[in-house]
Structure formats: structure tokens, C-alpha cells
Image (cartoon, rainbow, N blue to C red):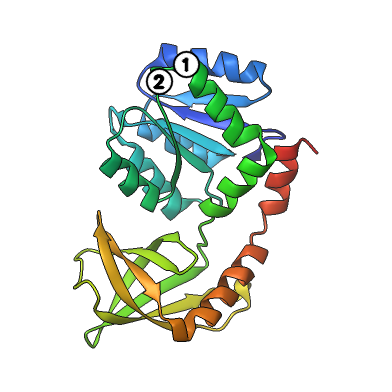
Amino acid sequence: MIRYNGNSILVVGTDEAYALQMREVLEERGAIVRYCITLVQAKKNLSKSDFDMIICSKSLNDGSARDLINWCKDNLSNIPIFSALGEYTQLEKKQLQNIGVKNFFSRNNASNLLDDISRALFNFDEFKKNLLESHYEKGISYELKVGGKKIIVKAQNIMDRGVFLSFEAPLSVGFPATLFLNFADVLNLQSISLRGDLQGEFAGGQYFQVSKEDMKQWENLLSHLCKKQDDVTEFLKKASGR
């Protein structure tokens, strides 16, 4: 795995000329930029190199931005800050934010686009915020017990008071549930269970809100996970130019 010594961006889009123009301008600002035009090429690049940010067009010839971020979560130990390029409805933005997209850039305003990218990647505080929110811990597996039945689920986005879960069939909103978290040995944690209930729906899943009774346990877990992000220090050094 290649680790670039600097702010690195992978641009994924169908318009090669636009991607090349973006690369030229961003490299003038100090970024290392690679581009590709298909989902297959993006996966190859991400398998070989560790990027700080991905900027992906809404649709690709062989997939979409949603397909790419889901692949990253299933295959990468470190998830870059993920930004979507294109015009999105508010519903589409909300759905993509739930699975980890942090920024939305419009290609119609080149000046604002470059300013937004620079702020998200090169500004230390903004980069730190996005990085911490983008954290995806592959060392945890999740099971949800609801209605006397256990099902395997995936965590799409961890929040202050709960977690967005994805699974095949949405369940009744407000239904009491228990979330079991099983940890890999490297995390030095024992498996825990959290009481809560399912609230709302989004594409492919629902939000699990931890009960007040178990909130302290959840807060302790979040604090522990923040400390276990082995690559955060290195990323922040790169972001601040140290």
C-alpha cells in the first residue's frame, strides 16, 4: 500500500478533461491528485494507494458514488473523506450523508468547488472534523435482536446517541431492540449489548438510538474507539503539513 506524503485526492468521474483540469489546479495548491473514470479503475487505485480524499461523480459508466463508498467500507481499513460531485436532491444528499459522504461539490461553479475542496482537505480543523466523522471500524461486527430474532447488520454511520444500521428489510419504527457489538481481539474490548429502539428509515436501513440507561456505556465506547484510530495521528500530521 502506497502512502503519499501529503494531501492526496482520488478524482473519479466520467469527464476526463474536467478531471485533468481539476488535477492541475489542485496540484498547484499542493495536493497529490490521481484520477480515473470508472468504478473498476477507482477500486484498483484504492487497493494500491492510501488516499486522504475521494471526489466521485454522481454516476459512472459502471456504477455510482454510492457503489464506491460501499466498496470502500467493505474493503479498506482506512476510509478517506468521501465527497460527491454533481447535482443532488435534498433526499439524495441525506441518504448519502447517512452512509458517510461528508461534502457535496457542484461542478457548475469551479471557483467555489476548488475553495470547498481546499477547505475540506487543507484546513486543519475542517480536515480533523471530517476525518473523525468518517471513521469506520472494521474490527466490530454487529447483531440486532428484535422481536426475539437476531439478524446481522452493518453500521453505516456512528452518531453521538446511536448508529445508522443497514439491513435488508426495515423493521417497525419505535420497536424495542438490543444491539450486540462483537469486537476483534486487537481492540482489547469485550462484546457489549446496548438497549434502544429503531427510529426512522433511510435507504436500506434504520437508525438505532441507544436507551438512556445504556447511554454512558455508549459514550465510553465512542471515547475508546476514537483512541483506537491508529492512523489518525499520521493523517493529522499530513493535514497540518508536519
Bin the neighbour count of mark 2 within 10 Å (Cα to Cα): few under 14, some 14-19, many 20 and up: some
Image point (56%, 74%), residue name = 219
Amino acid type, mark 2: Arg
Any part of residue 93 in sight: yes
User: What's the mark number on residue 110?
Assistant: 1
> Where is 174 relative to 165, above or below?
below
Indicate the position of residue 182 as horizontal and vertical percent values: 47, 78
Q: Are marks 1 and 2 in contact (CB under 8 Å)?
A: yes
On residue 107, which mark appears? 2
Instruction: For residue 192, say whether it is visible.
Output: no
Relative to residue 127, is residue 150 drawn left or right?
A: left
Outermost residue toward the right in this view? 242
Residue located at (60% from left, 67% from top): 225
Q: Residue furthest front?
A: 212
Element type at mark 2:
loop
Image quarter in which the C terminus is found: top right
